[in-house]
Amino acid sequence: MDEKELIKRVRNSFSAKKSRAEILTGFQKRGYKLAYADKLISKASRPNRTATLVFLTILVVFFIAFGSYSLLDKHKMELSNPLSSTTGNTIATFPDIPQQEREIDQIEITSEFISYLLNELAAWKLHKNPLNFEKPIINFKIGDKDFHSEIDNEIITYEGLSQKADLQIDTNKADLIKAISSNNSEDVLKQSLANEKTQLNVFASEAELFSKGYFKFYNFLK
């Protein structure tokens, strides 16, 4: 049996949870010299060079790709506030609470509301995973209405939830409108989270979130 085959068998023995001593004993029973058997075991214990090279190549490609995404000159998008066309004003300007509640009831939440809010929350900083090129996807539940947004160079929101979402934000109509009306949407959502009126559910792994730039976007929500 040639040396390559013997090394392969030693690796198989290690995979079968055999100890070095057991493998040495097996070689001795087959008439191999102790020094030669020990040499084979040492070679078998070394990392596979091909596998190591492939791993290092993937690692280098990942960091090059990730670095390219990180250096992209991304800017906040110019989106019009959907409340301006809906009410002619913003809810924050209504001093009369009953009137404000009536105004809120009359507003129909559309995909434009979600896209605008995400843009205000700096979701424009998100990008595709540089390894599998999957887009960041965020689900929204506002009462009985469901949406999901796909983000790359723009924010596109669709009706319905996505099974591929990285995270989901469940909130209510009043706090959503208040966040859109505010000059600081982050603070409004933080307060809503603190009051347990809004919930954040994360589905993706930390590695996936990192690869898409989420930690720049949603750390304040944590």
Image (cartoon, rainbow, N blue to C red):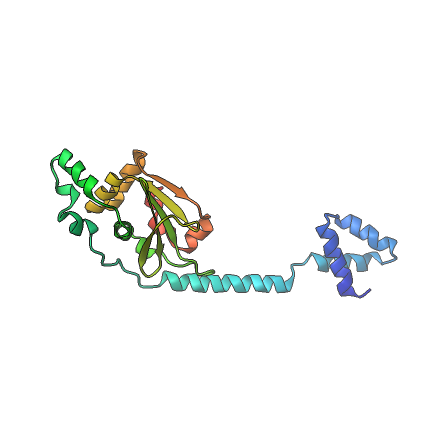
Answer with left or right where residue 137 lies relative to residue 92.
right
Q: Is residue 181 left or right of residue 54?
A: left
Q: Residue furthest left?
A: 95
Relative image position of residue 88 (x, y in whole percent): 13, 49
Residue 210 rendering spot, x and y as whole percentages: 42, 52
Tell which of 162 and 36 is nearer to you. Answer: 162
Q: Position of residue 51 (x, y in %)?
A: 61, 62
Which quarter shows the C terminus?
top left
Residue beneath the point at 75% across and 60% down: 7
User: Which of the 4 quarters of the picture holds residue 136?
Assistant: bottom left
Instruction: Indicate whether 172 appears above or below 113.
Output: above
Q: Is residue 111 left or right of residue 29?
A: left
For image coordinates 80% across by 52% down, the residue present is 24
Quadrant of the rendering where the N terminus is positioned: bottom right
- The answer to which of 204 and 28 lies nearer the viewer is 204
The quadrant holding residue 153 is: bottom left
